Image (spheres, coloured by chain):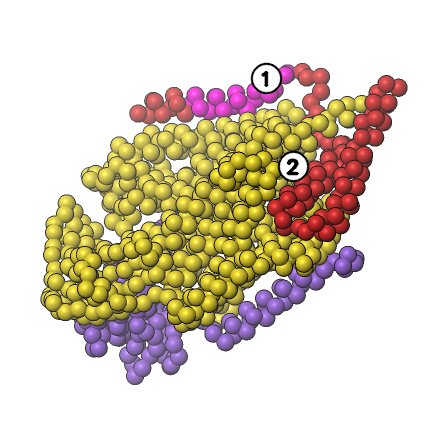
Amino acid sequence: MARSGSPVRLVVALSVAAALAVFLLYVSVAGGTPSIQPSQLKGRSGEVALVGKVTGRPSGDPHTAQGYRFRLRDVEGSTSVPVVYRGSVPDLFKVGREVRVEGRLRSGVFVAKRDTLRTKCPSKYTPAKRA
Amino acid sequence: MTTVALVVGGLLAVASVLYVALPFLREPAPSEDRLDEPGTLERRALELAEERDRALGALKELEFDHRTGKISDDDYRELVGPLRRRVAEALRALEPRAESNEERVRA
Amino acid sequence: MPELGRAALVLCLGLALYALTAGAYAAKTRRRRLARSAQNALLAAFGAAMVAAVVLLAALLRHDFSFVYVAEHTSLELPTPYKISAFWGGQEGSLLLWLMILTGFSAAAVAFGRRSGADLLAWVVPVLGLVTTFFAFMLVAVSSPFDTQVAPADGAGLNPSLQNPYMMIHPPFLYLGFVGLTIPFAFAMGALLARRADELWIVTTRRWTLFAWTALGIGQLLGAHWAYVEVGWGGYYAWDPVENAALMPWLAATAFLHSVMIQEKRGMLKVWNMLLVILAFCLALFGTFLTRSGIVSSIHSFTQSPLGPWFLGFICLVTAGSLALVFSRLTLLRARTRMESLVSREATFLYNNLLLVALCLTILWGVVFPILSDAVRGEQITVSAPYYNFFLRIFGLPLLLLMGIGPLVAWRRASLRSLGRSFAWPAAIGLLTGGVLLALGAGSSRAGLVAYTFSAFVLGSIGYEFVRGARARRALAGGSWLNALSELIARNRRRYGGYIVHASIVLLAIGVVGSSVYQTVREARLEPGQSMTVAGNRLVFRGYESRRGPNHLAIRANVDVYRGGDYLGRYRPGKNRYFAEDQVSNEVSIRRDWLTGGDLFLIADGINDRSLDLKALVKPLVNLIWISGFIFLAGALVTLWPSAAEQRRLAARYRELRPLVRA
């Protein structure tokens, strides 16, 4: 096996190619979730991650069928959208805090996916907390 | 507070400068100021020494693997010969250097 | 006092710059005294950094709120241990900790490296000087812990979530790891700059790399445990960019640790090793850049932190510079030996390397994907757990298997015959375990079953190695089994220490698999007296209790746990509300079953007037994860332990050649 074109190089090349193929296949199939702000929501019907600041007066109960209702607005802007959420609410959640929640827009209301609410940590150094 | 800070800071700076200048203060006029660097001969010798250690290590490991049963008797017989030869070659490659250098010094 | 701190940092910067410039000049023009002087500068830089650190620590302990940093991160009523941990709780302080460890390690590396290879050390010094200059510059000009203000009456205090013992140990361990990787990097670059094709740099830094890698591993485990018991969402790893920031260099360092062994034994893969050490170090820098700049959570955070662009620039400089250096020395690094067989220990090490690097790069891709997609498509697209878990399985499962195959295969070449014999027992153990587990219902997760089967195989192969080795030892020297075992380990520390570490990783894998794919989760809203069942445990809600603490109100839900007919105890999940900070913290309740190694994890998700929204998780085998940490540490200590015989041999190798050339 000790030819000048050593088997090591062949093994490496094939492995890299195989890994790349698997990788590209997965990423194109599974995709990812776009992170957008409320002002960018218009017209989008697919699943997205909505990032924004909590505004208005949250009401309701996240552990019931009716869900927890609050509004999210642009981090630097005023466009806001109503959100309905069911699942765990992180401890750091409060009005004025930046949060991220996954879901999709349905008839003007952002219907969130269960248990996907996350808060951005206010301090710029400590790592983000999660629900 | 600030006077203490000034004094400590000053001392620190002076101490650092002194420490950095120390090699020059100790030897203001040395006979040679050259940084030792392995020459071609020494590099080659180093290479051979590493090769020798590698061969010795491989032999040791072969023995160990054989004793613990990882390598069968047949495999051992097949591999030990070439390895021993490799070790012998590596040891031989290092020796003549010593001899030829001694000759040069004596001459 | 802040002036002293600032002055000390400026002095440190100056010394580092001198070490960089004078050191490089001395190495290039081969001046002995100047090289020595540059070394001394690095040592003095450590002194200066220490002075700055002491100043900050004193200010923290004295609650000197004229320091902006002290006012931002402590308060009068903060307990003393957290005043100390506030040192690294914020941006500037943590940078100072980094600098302190960096200069400390550099000083140690220089002091111990003086024994051999003066020409190598001469080039290592400017590389260390470069890295130190960067961090000192950041502290002096961009992000200083010594900014002052008119002292307020009291400080802002520490975020309650950071007020726990983990804050004392988790960041320092991680930093020891991150910074520790600088040393092998510096020696590798030094070797290239000095045009040395030999193994001196590897031999000198082997223990450094091991130490950094161990610290990084333990640090991550501590972080995971912190997340598990304190943050309390029921998990321990969320594939958060900040978590990945520590995992990536650790994976690269793992690959490096293994491939360096190939270079030692066979003289191959020199270029690969250079690339790996560069990757590990750059990922460590990248990791801290991610954590500090906030670039990944939101592109807007980039402008909030002035550090971001500087870090990015430095990382690009280091990456480009070191790659250029490797490229220019390629002829030096050409190997003379070839890999003889695809079925040899070298080959398994190579496969292990490829898998580790592939996993590392896919994680890196996942982390930077949002940034790239934002630049290309104008919006951030994030990937999350499904992406990472997919690749963890694809690369992790073969890695697990390889851990079992590696020890059974000999170096150079293994005949299929002897391979078959070696494999018999471990394979049998693996398959038997797999069969039993399948019968017990583990087939609910294919990946889980495969992982368990592989784990049994690996443990079997490791056990087999110990048995074979002890048996051979006894045959040679007699004595009891215990004697033979300890002699075996003592005489072959690297090999058997490595096996112990592998065993710990397998236990980690078993714990992770059990607590993720085989966990049960149930949620319910319970009125007092109502119950829910999760995996055979009946949980009855009995009502709330509240208690007022010094700075918080603690609300606890009383939950009685029954299994079968037995009463297992009362558990109290709940929440704390902190008055001053107006924050709520989750306080989970965990029932540890030491017999099965699993946990019953209770979260009071929603506290209502009368009812409780209870979330309960049953996580089998999760405690194996924490136990594996101890075994990991033990194994690492065994491999790190100095061996007098090895020291003698290496000293002889690098010094005996001197007399040969004194002509």
Residue C546's x, y, as percent? Answer: 11, 55
* Residue at the image point whose x is 11% and y is 67% from the top: C529
Instruction: Judge depth for marks 2 and 1 and give the one in front.
Output: 2
Left or right of A97? Residue C411 is right
Location of mark 1 (residue): B25
**In which image quadrant can residue C237 be found?**
bottom left
Residue C437's x, y, as percent? Answer: 42, 66
Residue closest to the eye, A84 or C499: C499
Identify the amino acid type marked 1: Leu
Circle 2 chain: C
Judge whether residue B21 is colored magenta: yes
The residue tagged with tag 1: helix, strand or loop?
Answer: helix
Location of mark 2 (residue): C200
Identify the amino acid type marked 2: Leu
Q: Colour of chain B?
A: red
Q: Which chain is yellow?
A: C
